[in-house]
Image (cartoon, rainbow, N blue to C red):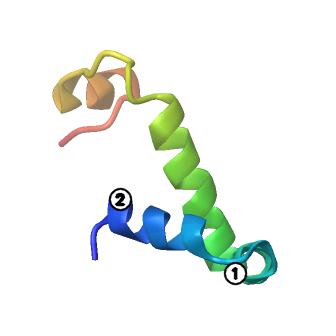
Amino acid sequence: MSAAEFIQKLEAMPESERERIFATLVENQEWREDLVDLMTIADRREEPSRPIDEVFKDLKIDA
């Protein structure tokens, strides 16, 4: 199932069922962290990318 299909099925559910699903996601620390990561990725999607070598250099990491 793709993410788009999942969203469509989620939107078709009764509100009480959606609330139960989201409550379960938020209660689980690991899933909550994953959701925060996904939201961060979505927020930063339009930012320019950088070569990993530059990132390592800025962080003073030898790779």
Question: Marks 1 and 2, how far apart in space?
Answer: 17 Å
Q: Position of residue 7 (x, y in %)?
A: 47, 63
Secondary structure of the residue carrying tag 1 is helix
Is residue 41 shown above or below 37? above
Q: How many marks?
A: 2
Secondary structure of the residue carrying tag 2 is helix
Q: What's the residue type where badge 2 is placed?
A: Ala
Q: Residue at x 46, y 41 (%)?
A: 41
The mark found on residue 4 in the picture is 2
Q: What's the residue type where badge 1 is placed?
A: Ile
Q: Quadrant of residue 59?
A: top left
| Closer-to-camera residue (52/32) | 32
Question: Dot 1, how many residues are within 10 Å of its Cα: few (below 14), some (14-19), or many (20+)?
Answer: few
Q: Quadrant of the N terminus?
A: bottom left
Evaluate if marks 1 and 2 touch, with contact meaning CB atoms under 8 Å apart: no
Q: Residue at x 31, y 15 (%)?
A: 48
Asked whether, in this view, residue 50 is left or right of residue 35, the answer is left
Q: Position of residue 31 (x, y in %)?
A: 61, 75
Q: Residue at x 38, y 18 (%)?
A: 47
Q: Position of residue 53 (x, y in %)?
A: 18, 28
Q: Quadrant of the C terminus?
A: top left
Q: Position of residue 62 (x, y in %)?
A: 23, 38
Is residue 31 shown above or below 51? below
Name the residue that disc number 1 marks: 21
